[in-house]
Image: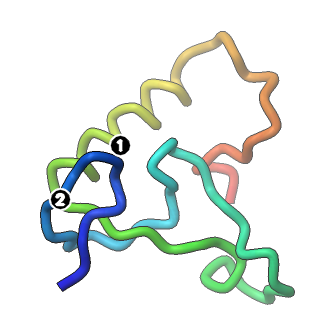
Amino acid sequence: MVKCDFPRCSSEGSVVSRLSPKGFLVATGNKAYSFREAYKRFTYCEKCHDELMKSVWNRVRETDEKGDDHVAPTAI
């Protein structure tokens, strides 16, 4: 099976996500005509995916540090 893409995790991955381990969308660099083709896919175990989603939503809700160049996961 596929290993979890989260750093320092060796569990089996079961959840496919477009969010990188740092919580951002990562472009494939290819010409894309859909969201599905435009961003890389990652695989996580349930535990790591839950932690990733918590950190993303906490970052989205905070008012500071909104000046970075990353696309918010809710923007697409």
Name above or below for residue 74 compared with residue 4.
above
Give the residue pinned by disc 2: 10
As measured in the structure, the alpha-carbon distance from the residue carrying label 2 to the one carrying label 1 is 16 Å
Q: Give me the residue at 28% from left, 52% from top.
A: 49
Name the residue at the right extreme. 31
Q: How is the image coloured?
A: rainbow
Q: Which mark is residue 70?
A: none
Amino acid at circle 2: Ser
Q: Secondary structure at mark 1?
A: helix
What crowding class fits label 1: few (fewer than 14 Cα within 10 Å), some (14-19), or many (20 or more)? Answer: some
Q: Is residue 24 left or right of residue 55?
A: right
Q: Which residue is mark 1?
A: 52
Q: Relative to 1, does residue 40 appear above or below in the rendering? A: above
Residue 68: image location, x then y, percent: 78, 29
Q: Quadrant of the N terminus?
A: bottom left
Is residue 15 or residue 63 the one in the foreground? 15
State the image quarter where residue 51 is shown. Answer: top left
**In this image, 67 relative to 49: left or right?**
right
Mark in front: 2 vs 1: 2
Total marks shown come to: 2
Position in image of residue 43 (x %, y %): 34, 69
The front one of 76 and 52 is 52
User: Residue 66 at x, y = what percent?
Assistant: 73, 22
Q: Are marks 2 and 1 in contact (CB under 8 Å)?
A: no
User: Residue drawn at (80%, 75%), measured in percent from left and top?
Assistant: 29
Q: Which amino acid type is shown beneath numbered disc 1?
A: Leu
Name the residue at 16% across, 57% down: 46
Secondary structure under tag 2 reads loop
Measuring from the top left, give residue 27's x and y in whole percent.
72, 67
Q: Which image quadrant for residue 40?
A: bottom right
Quarter of the figure with the C terminus: bottom right
13 is higher (above) or lower (below) than 49: below
